[in-house]
């Protein structure tokens, strides 16, 4: 017991001292009084209440804004990106992510709207994996498989506020969570943190870090559903998409990779040149729900995806250091969820582009490794860059 408390203390210190922001400061910073040259308005980061958990825990809502008018709202419940307002070609703002106005919506059943997903994003086949000869049994929450970290994954945890304020890059909020040894079946106490930064040059940067005290597996992502025409405004089939990948991981009927990485060339999976999402979706059984093998190979920040929406002119580019991206077209949305501003979310009303390691990597020795050992630091970054045309 003493040893366990000690480990937790060490991990808590580790997570609070993780790099990214120079100093820990949980106070909300006032806008600076001396504006930098050419800057009209100031960056801002703000904290307010988002409600109360059934056990009485207070949940916050953080708002990050920049001078272009972009506004990102994040809660420490599930480290969820609650909303993201971005201007169209005429400067009109719209919220481009699906979700809920209130905490209550997120406490109910929903398909990971805006959430940070972990300890392992996407599926692990038969809800088990072997590490150094030992079998670890995970929670099976997707038929016989394990999905998005299990029954109570990182998306359903209350994260701790580590820092909020302005940096030279923009407005940021840093949240942390300690996933205990054995949680959902995973080995090792894992101390992780996520930093959302809304930059002065219209990027939403999501940076993750994690450290463990026992060898484990990690794969963290953000599960936002986007509609660049505005959330709830219709389906996303008219969006034009480019994915810098010429292969995808072939899956079985349970959506577990078979191990084959198949070329996209000449198939409806090919987004190497700009194509509308809807142009060939009818030829893809069930709609798109596939992991693309990025040309960059991961390890360094590279342009993975460009998506544009013709009526609003909004463009989103996604840069990541991850080797894969799950392209999911909201195939399971069926009109049963009413989200923000009373909008009903029907099939294909949002798409996800979850930057990640490949599904079922813990059971696929040929896939890039997802193992994390004590003494190593897991770091990864994904950047969403906004513009218009
Ligand atoms: C998965 C889908 C799943 C969705 C919501 C996506 O990441 O690939 O199969 O339905 O998340 O859980």
Image: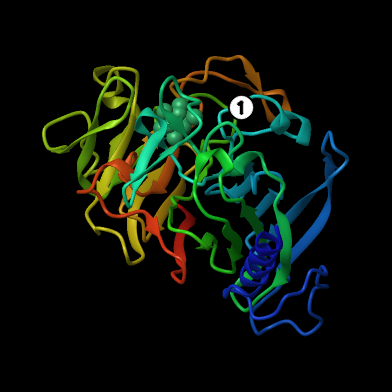
- Measured as percent of width and height from the top left, residue 231 is found at 59, 33
With respect to residue 149, does 67 lie above or below?
Answer: below
Q: Is residue 176 left or right of residue 329?
A: right
With respect to residue 294, does 105 lie above or below?
Answer: above
Confirm whether residue 351 shows in the render: no
Q: In this view, does 309 lie to the left or right of 234?
A: left
Quadrant into which the N terminus falls? bottom right
- Measured as percent of width and height from the top left, residue 130 is found at 34, 43
Task: Please tell me in which quarter of the rendered image ligand 1 is found.
Answer: top left
Q: What element carries label 1?
A: loop
Q: Residues within 10 Å of mark 1 (few under 14, many from 20)?
A: few
For the image, the number of numbered tags is 1
What residue appears at the point 25 percent right and 24 percent down from the top-left corner? 252
- Measured as percent of width and height from the top left, residue 300 is found at 33, 67
Q: Is residue 131 left or right of residue 34?
A: left
What residue appears at the point 67 percent right and 76 percent down from the top-left corner? 39
Q: Name the residue under label 1.
A: 110
- Measured as percent of width and height from the top left, residue 317 is found at 41, 53
With respect to residue 203, does 141 lie above or below?
Answer: above
Quadrant of the image occupied by residue 168: bottom right
Q: In this view, does 340 lie to the left or right of 348?
A: right
Confirm whether residue 59 shows in the render: yes
Quadrant of the image occupied by residue 198: bottom right
Of residue 81 and residue 140, the one placed in the foreground of this image is: 140
Residue sitting at the far right: 56
Ligand 1 within 8 angstroms of badge 1 C-beta: no
Colouring scheme, one of rainbow, by chain, secondary structure, one colour: rainbow
Of residue 180 and residue 236, the one placed in the foreground of this image is: 180
What residue appears at the point 37 percent right and 28 percent down from the top-left corner? 126
With respect to residue 25, does 258 lie above or below?
Answer: above
């Amino acid at each position: 017991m003493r040893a366990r408390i000690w480990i937790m203390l060490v991990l808590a210190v580790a997570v609070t001292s993780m790099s990214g922001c120079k100093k820990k400061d949980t106070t909300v910073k006032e806008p600076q009084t001396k504006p930098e040259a050419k800057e009209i308005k100031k960056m801002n980061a703000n904290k307010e209440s988002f409600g109360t958990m059934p056990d009485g825990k207070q949940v916050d809502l953080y708002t990050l804004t920049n001078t272009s008018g972009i506004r990102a709202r994040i809660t420490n419940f599930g480290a969820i990106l609650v909303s993201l307002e971005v201007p169209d070609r005429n400067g009109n703002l719209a919220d481009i992510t699906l979700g809920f106005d209130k905490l209550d919506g997120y406490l109910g059943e929903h398909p990971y709207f805006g959430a940070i997903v972990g300890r392992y994003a996407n599926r692990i086949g038969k809800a088990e994996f072997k590490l150094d000869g030992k079998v670890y049994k995970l929670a099976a929450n997707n038929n016989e498989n394990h999905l998005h970290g299990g029954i109570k994954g990182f998306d359903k945890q209350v994260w701790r506020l580590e820092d909020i304020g302005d940096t030279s890059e923009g407005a940021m909020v840093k949240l942390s969570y300690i996933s205990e040894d054995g949680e959902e079946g995973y080995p090792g106490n894992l101390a992780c943190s996520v930093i959302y930064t809304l930059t002065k040059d219209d990027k939403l940067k999501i940076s993750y870090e994690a450290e463990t005290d026992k060898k484990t597996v990690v794969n963290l992502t953000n599960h936002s559903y986007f509609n660049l025409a505005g959330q709830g405004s219709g389906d996303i089939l008219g969006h034009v998409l480019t994915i810098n990948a010429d292969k995808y991981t072939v899956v079985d009927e349970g959506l577990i990779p078979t191990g084959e990485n198949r070329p996209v060339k000449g198939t409806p999976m090919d987004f190497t040149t700009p194509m509308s999402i809807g142009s060939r979706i009818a030829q893809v059984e069930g709609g798109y729900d596939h992991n693309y093998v990025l040309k960059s190979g991961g390890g360094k920040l590279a342009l993975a995806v460009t998506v544009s929406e013709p009526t609003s002119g909004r463009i989103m580019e996604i840069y990541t250091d991850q080797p894969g991206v799950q392209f999911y077209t909201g195939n399971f949305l069926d009109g049963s969820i009413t989200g923000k501003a009373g909008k009903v979310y029907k099939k294909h009303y949002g798409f996800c582009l979850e930057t990640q390691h490949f599904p079922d990597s813990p059971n696929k020795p040929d896939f890039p490794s997802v193992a994390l050992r004590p003494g190593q630091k897991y770091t990864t970054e994904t950047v969403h860059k906004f513009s218009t045309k």
